[in-house]
Amino acid sequence: MVFLLAIPLGGFIAWSMDPNKRNKMAQDALRAPGPKSAFEKYYIREIVGGFIFVFGARLADGCTSGHMMSGIMQGSISGFVFAACAFAVAIPVAKSLKKLG
C-alpha cells in the first residue's frame, strides 16, 4: 500500500522540483491545437502507466529488478534466466528507441 501511495507522491515531488518542465508544459498546452488540455496531454498517460506498473508488480509479487537481484543472490535458476532475458530484450529496445529520437 505504501508503494502504491509513494508513486504519485514521488512523481509530484520530482515534477515540482523542475521549474523548466513546468513552464514547458504550460507553453505546450497553450500552443496545442484541439480540445486536449494539459491534463489530458501529460497526466493521464503517467497515471495509467503508474497503475499498470503497480498492477504488474503486485501480480508478480514484486518488481522485475527485485526478482532479478534477489533471484541471482539466492542462486535461483529463474533469477539468472530472467536476468538474461531482460537484458537480451532491453538492449535492442533501448537502441531502437534511441534511433527514433
Image (spheres, helix red, strand yellow):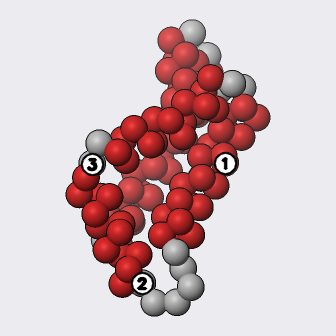
Q: Is residue 38 left or right of residue 40?
A: left
Query: Residue extending furthest bottom?
Result: 33
Which circle's residue, 1 or 3, is located before the other in the chain? 3
- Numbered circle sitting on residue 52: 1
Residue 14 visible in the picture: yes
Label 1 and label 3: CA atoms lie apart by 25 Å
Residue at numbered disc 3? 18
Q: Position of residue 52 (x, y in %)?
A: 67, 48
Tag 1, which secondary structure? Answer: helix
As drawn, 10 above or below 74: below
Q: Are marks 1 and 3 in contact (CB under 8 Å)?
A: no
- Residue at image position (54%, 40%) is 8
Q: Position of residue 15 (x, y in %)?
A: 37, 47
- Residue at image position (23%, 57%) is 20
Q: Are marks 2 and 1 in contact (CB under 8 Å)?
A: no
Q: Is residue 69 left or right of residue 20?
A: right
Residue at numbered disc 2? 32
Image quadrant containing the N terminus: top right
As drawn, 66 above or below 12: above
Residue 99 visible in the picture: no
- Residue at image position (64%, 32%) is 4
Q: Are marks 2 and 3 in contact (CB under 8 Å)?
A: no
Q: Residues within 10 Å of mark 2 (few under 14, many from 20)?
A: few
Which amino acid does the dot numbered 1 rest on? Ile
